[in-house]
């Protein structure tokens, strides 16, 4: 069983999205409201207790005014297994 929850790519995604939220000046509660999720969901993601699916990733990017391909590009710089 793969432990993708703690994989380098998921750790980096959490870091990038958390930094983007903070840079945008948004609280977890504000991001939750903008994405239709709960603050607890945002917290669980940021603390590594769950992964984002594609729909949530796109929703987070939209709320944070991020270009999804820029995040993907940064994730592609990680070394592959």
Image (spheres, rainbow, N blue to C red):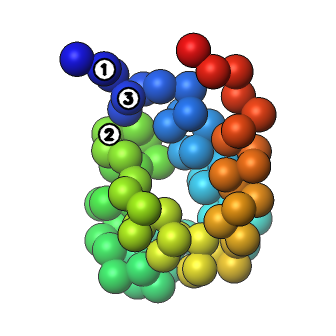
Instruction: Characterize the local packing of mark 1: few (<14), some (14-19) or many (20 or more) Cα atoms within 10 angstroms.
Output: few
Image coords of residue 12 (percent x, y): 62, 37
Q: CA distance from mark 2 to mark 1?
A: 15 Å
Q: Are marks 2 and 1 in contact (CB under 8 Å)?
A: no
**Of label 2 and label 3, which has the lower sequence position?**
3
Q: Are marks 3 and 1 in contact (CB under 8 Å)?
A: yes
Q: CA distance from mark 2 to mark 3?
A: 11 Å
Residue topped by disc 2: 49
On screen, residue 60 versus residue 12, left or right, reads left
Residue topped by disc 1: 2
Q: CA distance from mark 3 to mark 1?
A: 6 Å
Image coords of residue 20 (percent x, y): 69, 61
* Nearer the camera: disc 2 or disc 3: 3
Label 1 sits on a secondary structure element that is loop
* Nearer the camera: disc 2 or disc 1: 1
Q: Quadrant of the N terminus?
A: top left
Q: Residue at x 70, y 39 (%)?
A: 76
Label 2 sits on a secondary structure element that is loop
Q: How many marks?
A: 3
Image coords of residue 81 (percent x, y): 57, 14
The circle drawn on residue 4 is 3
Image: 57 above or below 72: below
Q: Residue at x 31, y 60 (%)?
A: 41
Q: Nearer the viewer, residue 22 or 76?
A: 76
């Amino acid at each position: 069983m793969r432990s993708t929850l703690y994989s380098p790519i998921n750790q980096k995604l959490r870091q990038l999205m958390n930094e983007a939220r903070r840079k945008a000046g948004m609280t977890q509660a504000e991001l939750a409201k903008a994405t239709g999720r709960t603050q607890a969901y945002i917290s669980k993601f940021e603390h590594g207790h769950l992964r984002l699916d594609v729909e949530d990733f796109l929703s987070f990017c939209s709320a944070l005014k991020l270009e999804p391909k820029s995040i993907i590009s940064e994730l592609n710089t990680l070394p592959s297994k």
